[in-house]
Image (cartoon, rainbow, N blue to C red):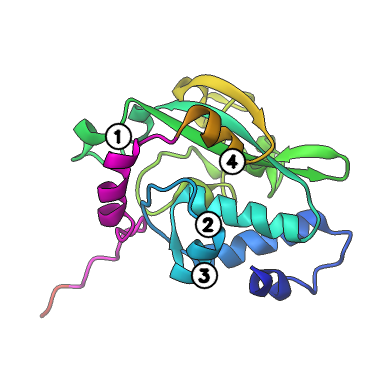
Amino acid sequence: MLALSAETRDVAPQAERAFLTAAHRLIAIRVRPVYAMNERQPVSTTLRLGRGSCSQRLALLEAVARSRAIDTRVRGLLLDGRFWHPRFPLLRALIPRHVVLAWPEFLLYGRWVSVSELYGDLGTLRAGGRFTNTGGMTLFDAIAHTAVDWDGGTCSSCDLSGHVLADLGYFHSRDDLFEQHGQTLCLPVRVPADLIMSRRSARTRTPARPRR
């Protein structure tokens, strides 16, 4: 954690947004995206392993923000499990019907800013096109390139509000959210699933060139 904060120490103290985007880019480089299931994994473990799910990498970004004295909170969203069908076309039967998502917000210059808008307002980011939840781009990566719009406030092509079954409100921390609403998978299912999926990369590999 301290190492990540140290690598962004050259960012001006008043440039909180620039600090967070720099930290986001560092995490994207240092922590390999996988399909881990433990929503309450300590950020120190994620950093030590060098791999983590979208949720685990977002938790790491929140921790780095707090190390800079930037307050954080999360918005709880209950998503339709079908949102992940395009990413796991062969495992649809195993995807839970409902998924609890912790979506971070940061207190910047006196107002709460969603992680969706770290790189700019959603109206500008929508030029990056729709997030399709396929291929190598995860939600963590997508916020730097396109509008991740859970409220349908931008345009129809970037509107993800149809996947939101319920807005669970705001929580002081993701631990508070999961304490109240539970993790997506119960413990007996989560442990074996995590052992398998936490080593599965979320990035697609470039196909090998055929030998001549």
- Three-letter code for the amino acid on which mark 4 is drawn: Arg
Residue with the mark numbered 4: 174
Q: Which mark is residue 42?
A: 2
Depth check, mark 3 against mark 2: the one in front is 2
For numbered disc 1, what is the local secondary structure?
A: loop
Q: Position of residue 117 (x, y in %)?
A: 68, 42
Residue located beneath label 1 in the image = 85
Circle nearer the viewer, 3 or 1 = 3
Q: Which stretch did the figure color magenta?
A: 183-209
Instruction: Tell me which numbered mark, 1 or 4, is placed earlier along the sequence.
Output: 1
Pick the quarter of the image with the N terminus: bottom right
- Tell me which label, 3 or 2, sits earlier in the chain: 3
Specify the quadrant of the image occupied by residue 64.
bottom right
**Label 3 – label 1 distance at C-alpha:** 27 Å
Alpha carbon separation for disc pair 3 and 4: 22 Å
Q: Earlier in the sequence, mark 3 or mark 1?
A: 3
Is the residue under label 4 in contact with that under label 3 (CB below 8 Å)? no
Kindly indicate the quadrant of the structure image that contains residue 114: top right
The quadrant the C terminus occupies is: bottom left
The amino acid sitting under disc 3 is: Arg
